[in-house]
Image (tube, rainbow, N blue to C red):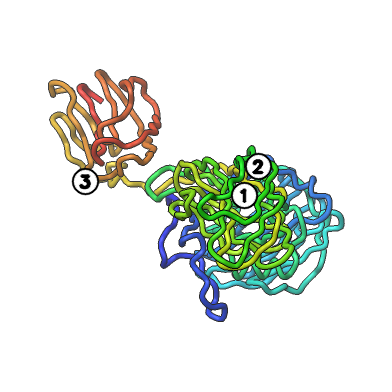
Amino acid sequence: MATTINSGYANSPKLTANIADHADVYGGRALVFDGVSDYLVVPDINMSAFTEYWSFSMWFNADTVSGNQYLLTGAIDSSNIWGIRTTSTTIGITNYVAGRGTYVSKTGTFLAGSWTHIVGIINGGNSNLKFYINGEEQSGTTSLDSLSNNTNIAIGSRSDTSANSPYNGKMSDVKIFNTALTEAQVQELYKKPESNPSNTTQYLERWYPMIEGNPESPQSIVYDHSEKKLGAEELGTWTNNPSYSWDTFTSSGTSITSAISDASGVHIATNPFLSVSGSLYKITFNLTLNSGTVPSISIRETVDGTIGDGLGIGASSEGVNTYYFKASSTKTLYMFFNITDTTSNWSASDVSIKEVLMGNHATTNFFGDDLVTNGTFDTDANWTKGTGWTIDVSDSNKAECDGTQTGNTNLQQNDLFTVGKTYQITFDLTRTAGNFRLLVGSSGSSGYYTTNATHTYTGVATGNGHLYLQGDARL
C-alpha cells in the first residue's frame, strides 16, 4: 500500500496524561511507513567520526508488532549492522557482527498504536550505552558487542538492503547527536518534543521533524533541520531612535558599547536587516548589565515599533542570549532593544543575526496514496470513455483506443488532482499506430509517447483536477 504523509489532530504524537498541557508535536504531522517498501536514506554521515558519545531521539507509533522491524539502522555491510529494532512489543538496541551473530541489549516494552519516545546514548569508544523509553532509563546490559561504525544510515528499514525488516507505523522528530545527552536533556526532549534542548543544538548532526509533504503528491525528500552553518551577518548600523532615544547611546559595528536610560518614557535602539520568507535566523548577543533592568529584545516590522511579521521575544538576560526567528515574508525588519519607564545601564557585544543554512536532506521512495480508481482496469467502470475507447477486462485487463475516431479523444477520470501540486503517473503502453499522451489537468507530456514500455510522468497539475489519457489511433 502506498505511504502517505500523515496530518491531523487525531493521529498526532501526544504525551501521556500525567504530563499535562503539551501541544501536538509539529502540528500533528508524521511520516507513515507502510511496512513493505518505505524507508529513508540518510546521506553523508559517518558514525565513526563520533569518537566519544553519540545519541539519537525519536517518536514512533507502530501500527503492527509482528516480526522484527527496524526504526533506525547503520551498516558497514550485510555482516556488520546495528539497529533500533522492535520484536513484538519489545524495543531495544541490537548489533550483528560477522562471526558472532545478533546481540541485543537494553530493551523495554511499548504499546502498539500509541506514541512512544525513545532515546539511545552510545559510547563510540567502548560501546557503553543507555536507553530511555518515555523519559525513563531501561535496565539491562550496558554494552554492545563491538558496535560497528558506518556511513550507511537508514530510517524505517535495515540499511544494508532496500526495505529489509521494514517498519510499519508512524514516525516523527528523529534527531541524531554527536554527544551524550544528559538525563535532563532526555527529559526535555520527551516533555517538549517540539524544541531542542538549547545547549545541544551545536551537537545536532541530523534533525528530521518529518513535517513536509502532502498525502496527494510524490514524497522524495525529507528535510534535515539541523544547523550546518550560518550565513553572512545581516545586521547593519545601530540607530538611537530620535523619538524614543536612550539618554546615552554609543555603538561600534554591530555591538552596543553603552546604553543608559532614566526611569521615564520609552527608549529604543534599532538595527535593520532584510528577512527572506521561510528562512530561519539565529540571533545572538552577549549582554552586560551594569545596573538597573535588562532591556527587552524583539524583531519588529517598523522602526517605530510595530511587531507585524516580526517576533516579540521579551526581556533579555545577562550573558549570552540565543534566539531563533523564522521569517514569514520578505521585507526589511528591525532588531529592537527597548525599555519603558525604568532605569537601565547595559552594553551588548557580538550582536548578530545570521541565516541558519540547512542541508543533508534524506531521500525516500515515499509516495502518496494512489488516486486513480480502477487503474488496473479490472472492471469496465470508473472511467469516462470518449469515442474509440473501450476497457477490455477479458484480455489482460487493459484500456484500448481502436483508431475509429477523428482527432484525439479522452479516457478520463475527473477531480483527482489539486492544482499546483506535483504528481507522478506510471503506465504501461502498447502502441500499434498513432499517438498517445496524458494530461494532468490542462498540462502534461510535452510530446507523444511512441515506444512500447512502462512510462513515468511527473508534473504539476494545472487547469482542472482531471486525468486525461488521450489517443487518436490504435493503442
* Residue beneath disc 1: 282
* Residue beneath disc 3: 382
Q: CA distance from mark 1 to mark 2?
A: 8 Å
Q: Position of residue 200 (x, y in %)?
A: 71, 58
Q: With respect to residue 293, does 322 lie above or below?
A: above
In the displayed structure image, the side of residue 415 where residue 156 appears, left or right:
right
| Residue at figure coordinates x 80%, y 69% from the top left | 141
Q: With respect to residue 421, does 437 lie above or below?
A: above
Whether pointer 1 and pointer 3 mark residues with C-beta atoms closer than 8 Å, the reply is no
Which amino acid, by three-letter code, is at mark 3? Asn
Q: Earlier in the sequence, mark 1 or mark 3?
A: 1
Of badges 1 and 3, the one in the foreground is: 1
In the displayed structure image, the side of residue 344 where residue 447 appears, left or right:
left
Whether pointer 1 and pointer 2 mark residues with C-beta atoms closer than 8 Å, the reply is yes
* Residue beneath disc 2: 230
Q: Earlier in the sequence, mark 3 or mark 2?
A: 2
| Residue at figure coordinates x 21%, y 46% from the top left | 382
Q: CA distance from mark 1 to mark 3?
A: 53 Å
Neighbourhood count class around disc 3 (C-alpha, 10 Å): few under 14, some 14–19, many 20 upward: some
Q: Position of residue 451 (x, y in %)?
A: 36, 21
| Residue at figure coordinates x 63%, y 45% from the top left | 42
Q: Is residue 107 visible?
A: yes
Callout 3: helix, strand or loop? loop
Q: Position of residue 126 (x, y in %)?
A: 86, 57
Q: Is residue 67 visible?
A: no
Callout 1: helix, strand or loop? strand
- Of residues 263 and 293, the one drawn nearer to the viewer in this rendering: 263
Quarter of the image with the C terminus is: top left
Which amino acid, by three-letter code, is at mark 2? Leu
